[in-house]
Image (cartoon, grey):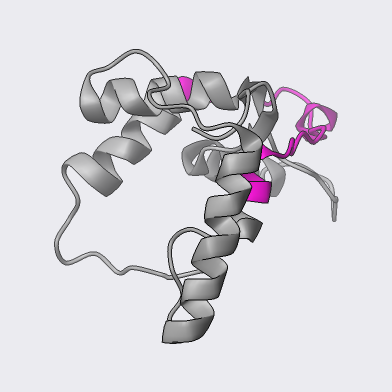
Amino acid sequence: MVGKGKNKKSMAYIGNVVAFLVACIDTEQKYGIYNYIDTPDLTMNELVSQVRLKLKGKNDVGLRLPYWLGMALGYTADLVSAIIRTKLPVSSIRVRKFVSSTEYHSSKDKLEKFEAPFSLAFGLQRTLHREFIDPNPIRDIFYTE
């Protein structure tokens, strides 16, 4: 954990996004532009605590590094990455993303009568289970930055 953990992150569970798209298709509306986000936004303290509880059985954020130390480690990783010409899982950009707030407003309420079928907590737990605890060994994996 880097920083104070008070920054918030907007997220969406794929099951809710699919349900929202089905609801959009079922309307009389010919087109629409929406920004879909499940609420409430979680702070990094809440998010990291929920992940640690699911994956490690511990209900806390674990080791907390001050921002300056996290950035120093990120820059060190950037240097090592440049020397060995391989991307590492830690970088200064990832540290900055981790400690920044990414709060967005959802426009899903503009679609009448839509209610997300799953809570964000359920979606997070299910995703962690499927990705880390009991992954399907023959699933397709799509890599992103």
On the question of residue 123 being in view, the answer is: yes
In x, y percent, where is residue 81? 48, 76
User: Is 126 left or right of 1, judged from the image as shown?
Assistant: left
Name above or below for residue 86 compared with residue 112. Answer: below
On the question of residue 116 being in view, the answer is: no
Seen as rendered, the residue at the extreme top is 59
User: Is 119 left or right of 17, judged from the image as shown?
Assistant: left
In x, y percent, where is residue 71? 62, 49
Name above or below for residue 4 compared with residue 133. Answer: above
Q: Nearer the viewer, residue 32 or 95?
A: 95
Q: Nearer the viewer, residue 31 or 4?
A: 4
Magenta stretch secondary structure, dominant: loop
- At 61% from the left and 24% from the top, the residue drawn is 5
Residue 130 within the magenta-colored segment of the rendering: no
Residue 19 is drawn in which quadrant?
A: top right
In x, y percent, where is residue 51? 37, 29
- At 56% from the left and 56% from the top, the residue drawn is 74
What residue span does the magenta drawing correspond to? Answer: 95-121
Residue 145 is drawn in which quadrant?
A: bottom right
Q: Nearer the viewer, residue 49 or 14?
A: 49
Q: Nearer the viewer, residue 47 or 17?
A: 47
In x, y percent, where is residue 115? 63, 22
User: Is 32 left or right of 68, judged from the image as shown?
Assistant: right
